[in-house]
Amino acid sequence: MTTLRIATRESRLALWQAEHVASRLRQAHPTLDVVLVPMTTNGDQVLDRTLAQVGGKGLFVKELELALLEDRADIAVHSMKDVPSVLPADLLLTSMLERADPRDAFISKHYTRFADLPQGAHVGTASLRRQSQLLALRPDLRISPVRGNVETRLRKLDEGNYDAIVLASAGLTRLGLAARITEYLDVERSLPAAGQGVVGIECRRNDQRAQQLCAALNNLDAEHCVRAERAFATRLEGSCQAPIAGFATVNKEQLQLTGLVAAPDGTQVIRRQLAGARQHGEQLGVQLAEQVLALGADKLLAALQHS
């Protein structure tokens, strides 16, 4: 019996995702011994500032990647929306699981829909992407960061710190908390982050064994979509410091990609769409990024970088 070690964060959602991957691997390879290697990342430890202020979403994956590079684990399991655009040279994304619901979720104890929020309502989100799109719809809102795991954020809402919070619906569903969702925000109102709703597997570039074992879990539709979305974000040098969104869907051989860049205060939103052959998703991502850059996203991103 061979062993495969999975590096994972210790949050309940991350452990669910890692256990899900482990279960799928055991089903595909009955003689495989799969073990979890849980660890705490800087992103889990620094909770008093926004992700943009402490270095971006890469804080959630750096320790897991180090475990791969030091051969303390064979694969790492990530929420793809947390994975930075550029990976270490010796690592690669080997498999993407089927996409769960990619939408953002509106959660409130007192208001049934986002549109029901009163003037000046207080909304919690740690994401500049969400903040910019919510403010574009409702400039009157007061938006503050809310950090911590899913349960912590829900507790802060329940304690009355916010009138509403916005989270990824996939994470809530995976934790059995879908009943807390008051309204699903359609992608027209809140375009998801690149990779949102997809669990991805990362491994060493030279580890053929791990790549072959994980190949059984790869979902081609999810892979095409995520690679297109990430190509869009990568060309824009997307991170948590920039309000960038990218979301693709596949219909037979056709891939449709929507991309967005916005000002953090929602006063400017540049949103465009492009379609083409699914196998050319990464090229579509770069083309769409070039389009939004030409429409003024370059100035928006430069101003953000400067600030």
Image: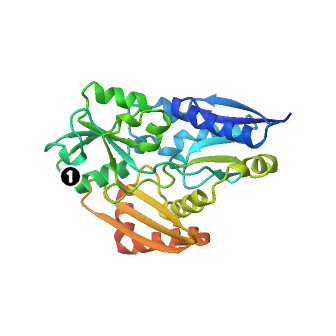
- In screen coordinates, is 18 left or right of 100? right
Q: Residue at x 68, y 30 (%)?
A: 36
- In percent of width and height, residue 83 lies at 55, 48
Q: Residues within 10 Å of mark 1 (few under 14, many from 20)?
A: some
Q: Is residue 4 above or below residue 93?
A: above
Amino acid type, callout 1:
Arg
Residue at left offset 32%, top offset 28%: 156
Q: Which residue is mark 1?
A: 138
- Left or right of 99: which side holds 187? left
Quadrant where the N terminus lies? top right
Q: How many marks?
A: 1
- Residue drawn at x 81%, y 47% as measured from the top left: 209
Which residue lies at the image location 40% right of the left edge and 54% below the top edge? Answer: 242
**Is residue 261 or residue 254 the one in the foreground?**
254
Image spot of residue 91 (x, y percent):
69, 50
Residue 208 vs residue 253: left or right?
right
